[in-house]
Image (cartoon, rainbow, N blue to C red):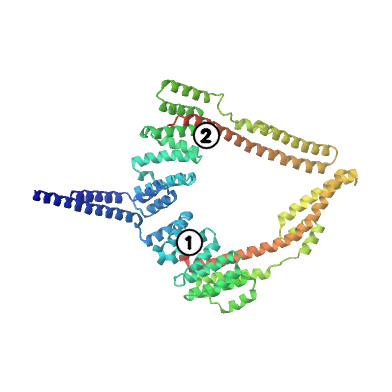
């Protein structure tokens, strides 16, 4: 009887042990499979994938992943790389201020830090924050001669951008053209400054007087040939109609009064328009000059640090 | 011991099946309704995969994610990138089915029609067949192919009904809807181009009578003023005021009438499409 009970007990214990081991094995399997879901790729591969998304312009997806990784502790050691990628992504999307903010958050031990600060200052300049850009440039610590040269070049460009051509001359004395990537940019910079110095701002008074004598001529003086000719034609038509009606019906006829008044209003507006077109002319020059200058500032950054844009 | 062996066997099998299906993570995200995350995961698998089969499957999966998000344009874009040779027979079948559906949803009716030419109707299960018949019916309406549309609509009804009396009723209702009297009255582009030569008549032809008469009035006023001035020796006034105004009113009115005609035709097709859709959808279980 006792032996029978012992056998049954032993069998029960064996079954329970088998059950526990199997359950443990199943739990381990599930754990393993679950790990497989999330740890298929190394961090390097994850980052490589984000870079692929950025280069194929899948911006929404890339931004989602970058934001997710930046917040994760798993990627703490790679935070700078992720901030760099996020900045690059925002740069591609023309969100320059946000991009600049990301680049500035990158810590100083990051190998591309000086390059990122220079690019960041450029982004500030492009967003009409020239003073902030200059301030940022003063904090840049160039890691080598290449960075130093680029930094000087950007400083010169910033001086011109803020209208200090005198300071620009001071810089030109100390600059070195040993790097091919910069020599072309420096030549263009000289051309731009020459263009800036030769710019004739033109007088709004002259434009107004010219338009009073011959309607539209003030606009032609302000380099708006098309607008000037159109104004001249329109005014001539109104004048001819008013004169025609005046000659046939006299001054008191409703058509003479109507077309005459219309001509007078357009005549006065044309003078005001010509004066205003000088302001437009100056603004357009400034805009086109700044655009050319900013473009010229950007090319050397691309040439010296192509890795920023790959 | 038997438990242990069974579990080891099951574990081995699951590991094998797991490694054979690299897109399992993306699939599970898709099943959970996390479509955006699933789309990223499919793209990741696409990027790291080296075999054509996985790559094609990933593209297809991504297209389905966009479809689920309601972004049919992106979905169609992804579908067009799928290399069909990388899909197995079952996936190929699904791919054609989804292309037809998504291109219809993206209002690319010609692509939908072309896709229909590729599909083998008998390969699909009964629910998919019903869906295909419905898409085909509606797509042909948008392409103004009403006979083909009626044919498909009748096939749809026949597939749904076993009861002969109800089937007869449904077929009659459809026949009525597709009768010449009930078809959308679309404006003929050829006739419109001729009618639109006369100012304001284009608007009247498409049903905007008030606007048409206003345009006629403006053109007449400009013309009369110009002619009157000219005849009375006011050549400059007549030419510049009359001719320039007519130029604006006449050509502006013609362009407006053309846009109105396209709008009206489209609205009528959509209306008719909705009518047929409502008639057919009520049969769906």
In this rendering, is residue A292 above or below A243?
Answer: below
* Tags 2 and 1 on a common chain: no
Q: Residue at x 45, y 44 (%)?
A: B68
Disc 1: which residue: A86
* Percent position of residue A231, x then y: 76, 53
Q: Residues within 10 Å of mark 1 (few under 14, many from 20)?
A: many
In the rendered image, the quadrant that contains the C terminus of chain B is top left
- Name the residue located 41 percent from the left edge and 65 percent from the top edge: A76
Packing grade of label 2 (10 A; few <14, some 14-19, many >=20) is many
Q: Chain of mark 1?
A: A
What residue is at 62 percent from the left and 76 percent from the top?
A167
Q: Residue B195's quadrant in the figure?
A: top right
Please state if B202 lies on the left or on the right of B36 as rendered: right
- Chain of the residue under the numbered disc 2 shown in the image: B
Q: Estimate the x, y position of residue B157 in percent, counting from the top left.
A: 44, 27
Q: Secondary structure at mark 1?
A: helix
Left or right: where B82 falls relative to A153: left
Say if B180 sits above or below A304 in the image.
Answer: above
Residue drawn 46% across the image and 54% down it: A61
State the residue in front, A238 or A283.
Answer: A283
Q: Is residue B178 visible?
A: no
Q: Position of residue B176 (x, y in %)?
A: 52, 23
Checking the image for residue A6, the label placed there is: none
Q: Position of residue B246 (x, y in %)?
A: 74, 39
Label 2 sits on a secondary structure element that is helix
Can residue A73 be seen here? The reply is yes
Distance, label 2 to label 1, CA atoms, is 45 Å
Given residues A260 and A232, the one toward you in this image is A260
Q: Is residue A30 above or below residue A282?
A: above
Residue nearest the observer in this picture, A82 or A166? A82
Mark 2 lies on residue: B142
Kindly report which numbered mark, 2 or 1, lies closer to the viewer in this rendering. Answer: 1
């Amino acid at each position: 009887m006792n032996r029978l009970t012992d056998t049954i007990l032993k069998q029960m214990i064996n079954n329970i042990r088998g059950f526990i081991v199997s359950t443990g094995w199943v739990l381990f399997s599930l754990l393993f499979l679950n790990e497989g879901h999330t740890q298929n790729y190394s961090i390097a591969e994850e980052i490589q994938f984000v870079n692929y998304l950025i280069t194929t312009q899948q911006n929404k997806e890339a931004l989602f992943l970058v934001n997710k990784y930046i917040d994760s502790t798993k990627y703490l050691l790679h935070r700078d790389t992720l901030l760099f990628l996020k900045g690059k992504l925002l740069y591609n999307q023309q969100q320059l201020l946000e991009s600049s903010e990301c680049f500035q958050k990158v810590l100083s031990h990051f190998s591309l830090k000086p390059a990122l600060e220079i690019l960041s200052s450029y982004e500030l300049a492009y967003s009409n924050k020239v003073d902030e850009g200059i301030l940022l440039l003063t904090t840049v610590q160039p890691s080598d001669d290449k960075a130093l040269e680029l930094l000087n070049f950007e400083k010169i460009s910033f001086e011109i951008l803020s209208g200090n051509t005198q300071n620009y001359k001071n810089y030109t004395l100390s600059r070195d053209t040993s790097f091919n990537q910069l020599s072309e940019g420096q030549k263009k910079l000289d051309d731009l400054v020459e263009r800036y110095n030769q710019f004739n701002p033109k007088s709004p008074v002259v434009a107004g007087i010219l338009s009073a004598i011959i309607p539209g001529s003030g606009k032609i003086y302000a380099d708006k040939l098309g607008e000037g000719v159109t104004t001249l034609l329109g005014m001539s038509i109104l004048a001819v109609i008013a004169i025609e009606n005046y000659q046939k019906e006299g001054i008191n006829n409703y058509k003479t009064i109507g077309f005459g008044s219309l001509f007078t209003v357009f005549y006065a507006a044309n003078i005001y328009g010509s004066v205003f077109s000088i302001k437009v002319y100056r603004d357009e020059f400034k805009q086109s000059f700044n655009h050319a200058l900013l473009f010229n500032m950007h090319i050397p950054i691309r040439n010296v640090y192509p890795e920023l844009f790959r | 011991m038997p438990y242990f062996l069974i579990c080891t066997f099951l574990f081995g099998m699951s590991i094998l099946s797991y490694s054979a299906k690299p897109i399992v993570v993306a699939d599970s995200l898709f099943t959970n309704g996390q479509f955006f995350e699933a789309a990223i995961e499919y793209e990741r698998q696409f990027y790291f995969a080296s075999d054509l089969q996985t790559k094609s499957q990933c593209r297809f999966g991504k297209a389905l994610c966009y479809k689920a998000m309601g972004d049919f344009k992106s979905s169609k874009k992804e579908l067009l990138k799928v290399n069909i040779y990388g899909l197995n027979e079952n996936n190929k079948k699904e791919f054609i089915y989804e292309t037809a559906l998504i291109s219809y949803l993206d209002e690319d009716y010609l692509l939908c029609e072309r896709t229909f030419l590729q599909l083998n109707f008998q390969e699909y299960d009964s629910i998919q067949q019903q869906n295909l018949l419905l898409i085909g019916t509606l797509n042909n309406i948008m392409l103004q192919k009403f006979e083909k549309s009626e044919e498909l609509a009748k096939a749809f009804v026949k597939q749904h009904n076993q009861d002969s009396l109800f089937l007869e009723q449904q077929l009659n209702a459809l026949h009525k809807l597709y009768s010449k009297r009930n078809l959308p009255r679309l404006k003929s582009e050829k006739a419109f181009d001729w009618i639109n030569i006369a100012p304001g008549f284009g608007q009247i032809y498409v049903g905007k009578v008030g606007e048409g008469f206003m345009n006629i009035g403006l053109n007449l006023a400009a013309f009369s003023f110009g002619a009157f001035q000219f005849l009375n020796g006011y050549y400059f006034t007549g030419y510049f005021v009359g001719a320039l105004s007519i130029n604006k009113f006449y050509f502006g009115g013609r362009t407006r009438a053309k846009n109105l005609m396209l709008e009206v035709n489209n609205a009528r097709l959509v209306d008719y499409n909705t009518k047929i859709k409502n008639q057919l959808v009520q049969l769906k279980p």
